[in-house]
Image (cartoon, helix red, strand yellow):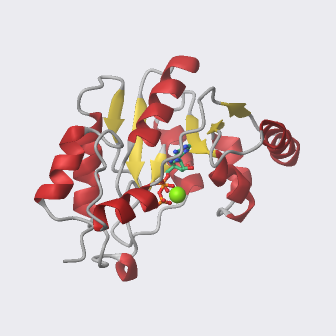
Amino acid sequence: MGGTFDPIHIGHLILGEAARRQFHLDKVYFMPAGNPPHKRNRAGRASDAQRVEMVRLAIASNPGFALSMVEMNEDGYSYTYRTLEKLRSEYPDTDIYFIMGADSLFDFDTWRDPQRIANAARLVVATRNQTDPVAFDALLEKRREQYHGEFLKLDTPNLDISSKHLREMIQCHESVRYYLPDPVREYILKNHIYMKD
Ligand code: ATP
Ligand code: MG
């Protein structure tokens, strides 16, 4: 699963665990994307190193989860098709699944080289933002026809949670307890991440 993870939250973790169980995956890798130079050290955001540390803390208790630094490039631009092709050539006998939320599948056509993504991996997609189930199935079917790839539905409830909303809650000093694992919440508070003052 790729993402900005700014910060990682229970939505990401539930998706990872659900995919691991539903598709009998050996391992789920969380691949934080590097920020390009102009997006680094922005006010109200975590640094690359902090986002990585939060992923590390969040997944520590799950032996089925691991951190991958493959998308943490120095120039900050990571393209999913390149990552997946690289993983395929490194692990030619491994089936690769790429986990995403429905919002990402709606945007899929705008990603760099979506055809190569669909060639390199099975796409596992979870519902998001209260997507109508009929529209969600129609979208999956449309993508299958477009790319002749495997677009698989993850059986998860709609999880109304986003990093953006959490950043706003933290900034307003609202409690984010239970929206992210305690060690991540403690790390955020201790390092004053996402707080303007
Ligand atoms: P932001 O609000 O900053 O965009 P985010 O919560 O969307 O953050 P990302 O790091 O952008 O988190 O997401 C990484 C991947 O996880 C994306 O494919 C996204 O669709 C998926 N995802 C994140 N949160 C959820 C959720 N609550 N339900 C389903 N999918 C999710
Ligand atoms: Mg997002």
Q: Residue at x 64, y 38 (%)?
A: 125
Specify the quadrant of the image occupied by residue 137: top right
Q: Residue at x 26, y 62 (%)?
A: 173
Where does the C terminus fall, quadrant-wise?
bottom left
16 displayed left or right of 100: left
Q: Residue at x 70, y 44 (%)?
A: 118
Can you name the residue that lies furthest to the bottom here? 38
Can you name the residue that lies furthest to the left here? 190
Q: How many marks?
A: 0
> In the rendering, at what x and y percent does residue 121 appear?
63, 38
> In the rendering, at what x and y percent does residue 195 appear?
24, 70
113 displayed left or right of 27: right
118 displayed left or right of 190: right
> In the rendering, at what x and y percent does residue 146 appear?
86, 48
> In the rendering, at what x and y percent does residue 44 appear?
30, 73
Residue 6 versus residue 12 in the image, above or below = below
